Amino acid sequence: MREVRISDVTMKQSGNTREVSLTFKEKLEMAKLLDRLGVAVIEAEGITQTKIDSLRIKSIASSVKNSVLAVPVALDAESVQITWKALKEAKRPRLQVPAAVSPAQMEYVHHLKAQAMVTAIADTVSACRALTEDVEFIADDATRSDPEFLCQAVRAAIGAGAGTVTICDAAGTMLPQELRAFLESLYEQVPELHDVTLGVSCSNDLSMADASAVAAVMSGAGEIKAAAYPVNIVSLAGIVRILQNKQDVCGAYCRTGLTEMKRITDQIRWMCETGRSSRSPFDNGVDDSQTEVTLTVHDDLAAVMKEAARMGYDLSEEDGTRVYEAFLRIAKKKERVSSRELERVIASAAMQVPSTYVLESYVINSGNVLTSTAHLKIRRNEEELEAVTLGDGPIDASFLAIEKIAGQHYELDDFQIQTVTEGRDAMGEALVKIRHEGKVYAGRGISTDIIGSSIRAYINALNKIVYEEQG
């Protein structure tokens, strides 16, 4: 009995819909969950902004331990090199070459005629194959293509080294028996398909994606694109359940287990449905606590910098030295230093910059019978700015006011509060981590008022972003 691989496209598809907006941290957590679930392939979005997207892919690559990590490239050599540079540290990397093969999409998306398209496919697949053995050719909109041209494109991709060829029914107009006949005809016309893995991607426009995927498996397909969250494609839970219960009928099985399926898909659904990324600093749907790593006085500078990089910090050599010196002062006094303690060291010692933004005053209104409001006055250089905002709590409202004054929304990567002295007038320390262009900036604030310390911490981190942008 042959194995059918499940390739999850939730993360990739989320970038193509307005209904789902995932933060950097949520994408990282989703990859870990899918890896734990045992899907064969995890598909990530491609690179459009080199610096930001490369960091995202590198971070995901370091987190995925068992699954193949697949990332698409554009039809040019430069895109292949940039993508591979970010992906190459993955344990099981795959480069994908998607290409529109229907006449309308070919010219609209790629601005190429048929023969030029075949050449571009072959050249790009060949460039990918020179870097990795795992290369996938994805024939977008294949069911609406010219049959002769589709065969030509598939032959070119296989000849150039593609080990997986995926046929997409993007229109979602084929019934299961129609798709089965389509694939069987393709096998007849392109015998080379028997030497590679045939994958399928079925749109759910007719609410028959799962049935179509099963028909494809019975035709010989060895890989199915599915999603843990409903994004108009085959359901991950649905196709796994079918293959687990109907192995004898389908003549195939998959390794993705059902034991943790509901718990993990529920977590992914929760992340996808938070729906607050466009308006609130507290837009993170990740509920698992950060992985804790402990360091000791015996760890050298390289080990401390490696942990800082894992947490998302890109420290200069000068800041790295300052952080390490501060880390040693703490490590000599206690047996172990946790990741959270290291973050406080980074916030205190790294990138101390002039204050572009300075808090002048704040007024907070909050209670259990009224919506929290924040009125902040902040001086930017010599100009006094103010904002009044509503929020889900006083700190949420305060952070929104800062973003309104700054004129930009930032992803809140982490937020922590702890007391640093005892008694009724205890001092509270806040640590705020915000992410901008893929990089993490930490700010620290201290006050007898936890809201005040939180505001100061956010402004401290914001000043670091502004300083680096102006530098």
Image (cartoon, rainbow, N blue to C red):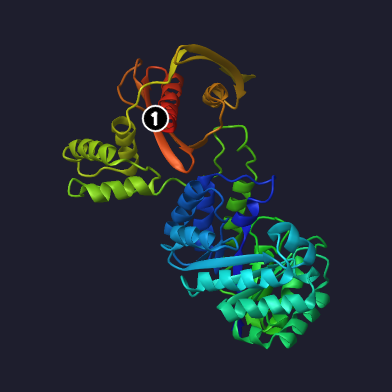
Above or below residue 412? Residue 76 is below
In this rendered view, identify the residue nearer to me: 124 or 191: 124
Taking 295 as reference, is 169 left or right? right
In this rendered view, identify the residue nearer to me: 158 or 21: 158
| Residue 31 pos. (x, y %) | 52, 57
Helix, strand or loop at label 1? It is: strand
Instruction: Report the residue marked by disc 1.
Output: 443
| Residue 133 shows up from this direction | yes
Please give the name of the residue rendered at 58% of the width and 16% of the height, measured from the top-left corner: 387
| Residue 4 shows up from this direction | no
Above or below residue 190? Residue 78 is above
Query: Looking at numbered disc 1 in the image, what kind of residue is underneath it?
Result: Gly
Please give the name of the residue rendered at 17% of the width and 37% of the height, measured from the top-left corner: 333
| Residue 411 pos. (x, y %) | 52, 37
Above or below residue 21? Residue 278 is above
Please give the name of the residue rendered at 34% of the width and 32% of the height, measured from the top-left corner: 347
| Residue 272 pos. (x, y %) | 63, 47
| Residue 39 pos. (x, y %) | 56, 67
